[in-house]
Amino acid sequence: MLFDLRGKRRRFIQVVYALLAALFLIGFVGFGVGSEAGAGGIFDALGVGGGDSSSSNPQYDEDIDEAEQRLEQDPKDEQALLQLAQTRYLAGQAELEADEATGEPVLTDESRTQFDESISAWERYMKLAKRPSDNVATQVVNSYVFLNDAAGAAKTQRIVAEARPSQGAYSNLAFYLYLSGDFEGGDEAAKRAVAEAEGSQRKSVENQLARLEEQARKLEKQQAKQAEQAPEGANPLQSPLGGLGGPQPAP
């Protein structure tokens, strides 16, 4: 299994896979994800960007220790919290493993811990910062993704979209909002994405986002129905891609 689905928010990452399959089926690749305009995107979070983060970096430990020492001196040190949020994310990414058959990222216990600490530092930082860093937000949003928190991902992605308004940034925001079940908010973000798109692309972006919303609504209903029909204690959602004809997660 590519991700640990035992958590209370397991449905998010399962729906992510299903929606990714839907996006491939309708020929919609990435909302400009991986570029500066669409920073903080879902494909980057799932390791689709092709980067090599297979080994940890000792520098992360040094930077983490430095930030934590500074926070012992001053728990409200915003820059130390920011450094900790960013470095913990990078350390978590480095601890991910890859499924041998599919190349998909596999969440390990160590990567889970690092992502959780990244979010903890970020949320402490957010209580203090008047103008949150959109640069670090582009990374921390992926910590939320890996820990299956769609609402947290959407809240963080909104910082990116408002600081760097673009078709890609608002499309990603719509994506996270739809996954969290906030369809009204997703529709608003989708409208902004269309408005930010170049004139010749607007109709295409509008159609693609409408299909994404449609898929999200269908999947939400399917997931709810499957959950109702499943025996107590069972997880009926091991292979959310099956109904979409996309690639199957490894067992």
Image (cartoon, rainbow, N blue to C red):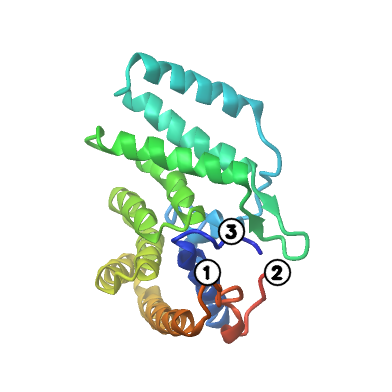
Residue located beneath label 3 in the image = 4
Query: Label 2: how many residues lie within 10 Å, few (<14), some (14-19) or many (20+)?
Result: few
Number of marks in picture: 3
Query: Label 1: how many residues lie within 10 Å, few (<14), some (14-19) or many (20+)?
Result: many
Q: Earlier in the sequence, mark 3 or mark 2?
A: 3
At label 3, the amino acid type is Asp
Element under label 2? loop
Q: Please provide percent x and percent y for residue 58.
A: 65, 26
The N terminus: image quadrant: bottom right
Name the residue located 59 percent from the left edge and 44 percent from the top edge.
Answer: 111
Do the CB atoms of the residues marked 1 and 3 lie less than 8 Å apart?
A: no
Element under label 3? loop
Q: Please provide percent x and percent y for residue 212.
A: 42, 78
At label 2, the amino acid type is Pro
- 1 vs 2, front mark: 2
Residue located beneath label 1 in the image = 14
Name the residue located 66 percent from the left edge and 70 percent from the top edge.
Answer: 249
Query: Label 3: how many residues lie within 10 Å, few (<14), some (14-19) or many (20+)?
Result: some
Q: Earlier in the sequence, mark 1 or mark 3?
A: 3
Q: CA distance from mark 1 to mark 2?
A: 13 Å
Q: Please provide percent x and percent y for residue 133.
A: 34, 38
The answer to which of 69 and 154 lies nearer the viewer is 69
Q: CA distance from mark 1 to mark 3?
A: 10 Å
Q: Residue furthest left?
A: 130
- Does residue 62 appear to the left or right of 86 in the view shown? right
The answer to which of 144 and 131 lies nearer the viewer is 144
Q: CA distance from mark 3 to mark 2?
A: 11 Å
Element under label 1? helix
Numbered label attached to residue 251: 2
